[in-house]
Amino acid sequence: MNVVIAGAAETDEVGRLPHHSTLQLHLEAARNALADAGLTKDDIDGVATVGTPGPIQVAHALGITPAWLDGTGVGGSSFLFHVRHAAAAIRAGLCHTVLITHGESGRSRVGAGRYGMGPDSLLGQFEVPYGVVGPPTSFTITALRYMKETGLTHEQLAEVAVAQRRWSHLNPRAMFRDLITVEDVFASRMVAYPFHLLECCLVTDGGGALVVTSAERARRSPVHLLGSGESAESPIISQMEDFTTSKAFRRSGEAAFAEAKITHEDVDHLMVYDAFAHVPIYGLEDLGFVGRGEAGAFIAEGHTSPGGRLPMNTNGGGLSYTHTGMYGMFAIQEAVRQLRGEAAAQVPGVEVSVVLGNGGMFASAATLVLANRLP
Amino acid sequence: MKPAPKPTPDTQPFWDGTAAGELRIQRCQTCARHYFYPRPCCPHCGSDQVEWVRASGRATLYSYVINHRPAPGFEDEGPYAIAVVELEEGVRMMTNLVGVENVPEKLPLDMELRVVFERRGEVSVPLFEPAATDAGGAR
C-alpha cells in the first residue's frame, strides 16, 4: 500500500507568538493541515504528537476519538518517527488516516512543558554537575574532536550558517533573512567555543501538522513516502560512541535509502536537522552524500546553496528560519513544499527529497525519503 | 552553588568511590571490558557478571567546549571548559578541567590528564587536571 503525506501545513505564523498557547499552536497547525488535505477531523482516526500537551489532549481538543495513538517522544526527530509509525499502522490496517501535530512555545513558553531532569537522572548525575546549560553547551561538544580528526576549519563551520542564510534570504517567513559572511559569524557573540551565536539555532514559537494516509484516500496530489528509517544512540552526549559520526544518522539513513531503493544520485533536495552548524556536516557524511571529512568543503564550495547540486535546508533551517525546540516538523514541511513546487525558495524540478531528523543531542534519528512520483 | 548529583542505587558505588578519593568504574568479568555509566549489565556482551574496579585516574582530553554563558553556580568562573575525557581504561566521561587556564591554546586535544575530586555538598565529583602539574589529590 502506498502511504502518502496528503496534507501539510504550519501555523499561520512562526517566530514570536506570545499570544498563542502551546495547545493553540497544535490546533492551528492541525486545522491548517486538514484544510490543506481537503479532509475534516472526522476523517482522522489516528493521532500522533510529542511533548506538551500530548496526543490525548490534542485528539480530545479536536473532537477526535482515535483508534490509534503514537506519543513517541524522542526529541526533535519525533515527527519523522510518527510518519514512519503511521505508515506501518496504516499498512497494518490499524487506522486509515493519521494526524501528526507539533506546537511549541519554545520562545514565549506559553502553556509549555518544563525543561530539565532531576539531579538523580543520568544527565543530572553525569553531565549537569559540570555546568551544562542545555544544548548549546553539550550538543556542540563533539565538534572540536571532529575538527581535529577531519581538518574541518572554523571558517568551514561558519560557512554552514552563511550557506543557510542564502536560503532564508529568499524566504519571507524566516526570522533571519539578511545575508551574512564568515566574518559576521566570527563577530557574533561566542556562546560555547567553537560556536558563535550565528552557528546556533533560533528559539521560536510555532507549529506544524501532517496528514498521513493511503494514496487512495488522498484528495490532493500526494507526497509519497518511499522509505524511512529510525535509530537511537546514547541518551547523554558524553557517551556517544564516536564524536565524529552519528550511528543513529547512519543506521536510519541506510534503512530509508534501502527501502526506497534509491541512490544518492536520485536525491534532488535534502533537509538535515540543524540545531547547530556542525549537525548538517555530520548529516551529509553519515547519509553518504560525501565522504568522511568532505562535508565542510562541500558546503563552503556552495554545493548546498541556491544553484548548488544538492540544495540543503532550503527554508533557512533551524539556524535562520525557525526552531521551536523540536524542529523536525519544519524540515518535513519544507520537503513537502519543495516536492509540491510551493516553496518560498523553490528548487526547480525536485522529485525526490530526503529528510534527516535529529532528536536530543545525536540521541535519536530518523530519515524519510519523500517523492512526488512513484519510482 | 554548583549543581550536585544525587546518587541512585545503581550509581551509589561510583559516588562512594569519589567520596573516598577513588574513580571507580565497572568492568565485565565475562568479556573483561570496562564500561561507564553505571549499569547492572555489560553493554558489550550482555553479561551480568560485572564488578567495580578502581580506574587509574589517568585520562586524555577527547573533546570540549568553552561555555561563555555560565550555568548556575559557575558565574564566578569566567568562560569554562565542559570536557569529555577518555580514561586509560577506554571509557569516557564528562568533566571540568582544573589547574589549567580554560582557553583553547592551553587545551590541545589528547593532552594527558589525571583525576582530582571536588566536594559538592554531600558528594564529590571527578574533575581532571593536566598530568604534568605537581598539584594533585583532593581539592
Image (tube, helix red, strand yellow):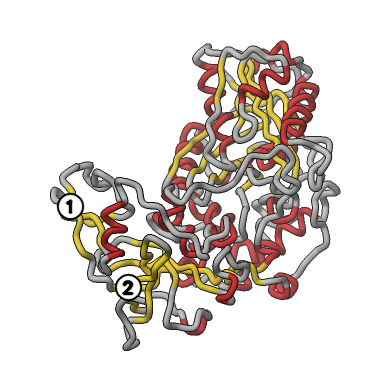
- Which quarter of the figure is the C terminus of chain B placed in? bottom left
Q: Is residue B132 above or below residue A304?
A: below
- Distance, label 2 to label 1, CA atoms, is 21 Å
The circle drawn on residue A260 is none
Residue at horizontal 66 percent and vertical 68 percent from the top: A196
The residue under label 2 is B115
Query: Badge 1 is on which residue?
Result: B51
The residue shown at (52%, 56%) is A282
> For residue A336, what is the image quadrant?
top right
Q: Using the image, name the chain to which the residue with label 2 belongs.
A: B
Vertical side of A357 occupied by A53: above or below = above
Q: Position of residue A317 (x, y in %)?
A: 70, 51
Q: Secondary structure at mark 1?
A: strand
Are both tags, 2 and 1, on one chain?
yes
Q: Nearer the viewer, residue A228 or A323?
A: A323
Image location of residue A48, percent across then percent down: 60, 26
- Mark 1 chain: B
Q: Is residue A19 left or right of residue A205?
A: right
Q: How many marks?
A: 2
For the residue labelled by badge 2, is the local secondary structure a helix, a strand or a loop? strand
Of all residues, the one furthest to the left in this rendering is B30
Amino acid on which disc 1 is placed: Glu
Snapshot quadrant of residue B60: bottom left
For this orientation, the residue located farthest to the right is A172
Left/right of residue B73 with respect to residue A110 in the rendered view: left
For the residue pair A170 and B88, the one nearer the viewer reads as B88
